[in-house]
Amino acid sequence: MQYKIGDIVLGTVSGIQPYGAFIKLDNNEQGLIHISEISSYFVKNITQFVTIGQKIKIKVIEILEDKNLYRFSLKQVGTRYRQNVRNFKKISNKKKRFKIPDDQQDFTPLEQNLDQWIKEELIKIGEKK
């Protein structure tokens, strides 16, 4: 095995499966980029990031000498974009939280309209049959 862990190498995408992309190196050695190492963002479809025949820079993250294979990472080579989950949660929670004024916290409108709504739905059901 020519390369060591941490090396950045140039490889060609030789195959794509739902779980990762197969890479062939110039010296006929091979390896895999697992789907979790494609991008720091959620990856639903690997073909959105790489295509067969494409040459890409990848980082060696593990060597499986017994199988004569490498494990590679694409996301550790390029600019790393972090998803700020904490801020996302804060923003989404602010959208969901709203205070109903105290004078509007009763069921009077529901009580007044419930009988009419039931009658309307029964008519709709009867028309469908």
Image (cartoon, rainbow, N blue to C red):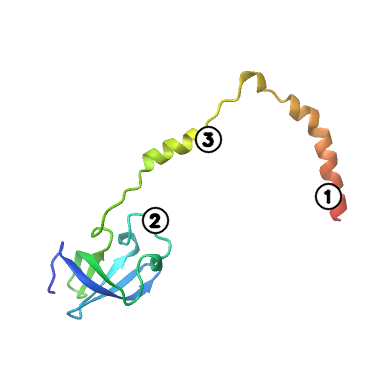
Element marked by disc 1: helix
Residue appearing at x 40%, y 65% in the figure: 48
Left or right: where 96 falls relative to 16 = right
* 89 lies above or below 58: above
Measured from the top left, where is residue 128 in percent x and y? 84, 55
Q: In which quarter of the image is residue 38?
A: bottom left
Q: Which of marks 3 and 1 is nearer the N terminus?
A: 3
User: Mark 3 and mark 1: span between their CA atoms?
Assistant: 34 Å
Q: Name the residue under label 2.
A: 42
Element marked by disc 2: loop
User: Mark 2 and mark 1: span between their CA atoms?
Assistant: 44 Å
Q: Name the residue under label 1.
A: 125
* 63 lies above or below 128: below
Q: Quadrant of residue 101?
A: top right
Disc 3 residue type (three-letter)? Lys
- Residue nearer the viewer, 84 or 128: 84
Disc 1 residue type (three-letter)? Ile
Element marked by disc 3: helix
- Say few, some or many: other residues with alpha carbon within 10 Å of mark 1 (under 14 / 14 to 19 / 20 or more): few
Left or right: where 89 falls relative to 58 = right
Disc 2 residue type (three-letter)? Phe
Q: Nearer the viewer, mark 3 or mark 1?
A: 3
Q: Earlier in the sequence, mark 2 or mark 3?
A: 2
Q: Mark 3 points at which residue?
A: 96
Measured from the top left, where is residue 73 in percent x and y? 26, 63
Q: In which quarter of the image is the N terminus?
A: bottom left
Mark 3 and 1 residues: CB-CB less than 8 Å, in contact? no
